[in-house]
Image (cartoon, rainbow, N blue to C red):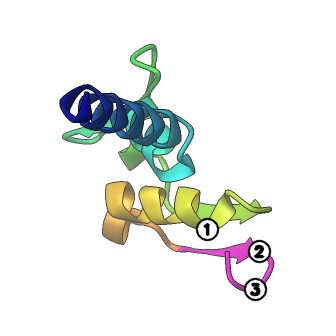
Amino acid sequence: MEVVISNAHFVANKMIDAAIKSVDPYNLVQEQLKIENDILTIQNKYPIKLSKFDNIYVVGGGKGAAPMAKALEDLLGKRITGGLIAVKYGH
């Protein structure tokens, strides 16, 4: 009986982890945006040639803004000119 409970506990934890990961703002941005060479592609459908832009600013607000901005920073790196993110302290 202990093995069944331990296995059920393991499976339940895996399900919870997957559910949390699927709605994490950082992961959502990373999954929806891709860069290859000079092309930023949104949802594998909308290509944007980044060299057409002199400046890229990141602007956001709200609970998910900080992890989303971090995902953009990780993706775009030095291509970002600047930005402003407004979040409640601790988010």
The span picked out in magenta is 82-91
Amino acid bearing label 2: Val
Q: Residue at x 68, y 83 (%)?
A: 90
Residue at mark 3:
89
Q: Marks 3 and 2, how far apart in space?
A: 6 Å
Between 81 and 66, the one nearer to me in the picture: 66
Q: Secondary structure at mark 1?
A: helix
The percent position of residue 24, horizontal first and vertical second, equals 53, 46
Residue at mark 2:
87
Residue at mark 1:
66
Q: Residue at x 46, y 57 (%)?
A: 72
Between 12 and 47, the one nearer to me in the picture: 12
Amino acid bearing label 1: Ala
Q: N-terminal of the two: label 1 or label 3?
A: 1
Across the whole image, how many numbered discs are drawn on residues? 3
Amino acid bearing label 3: Tyr
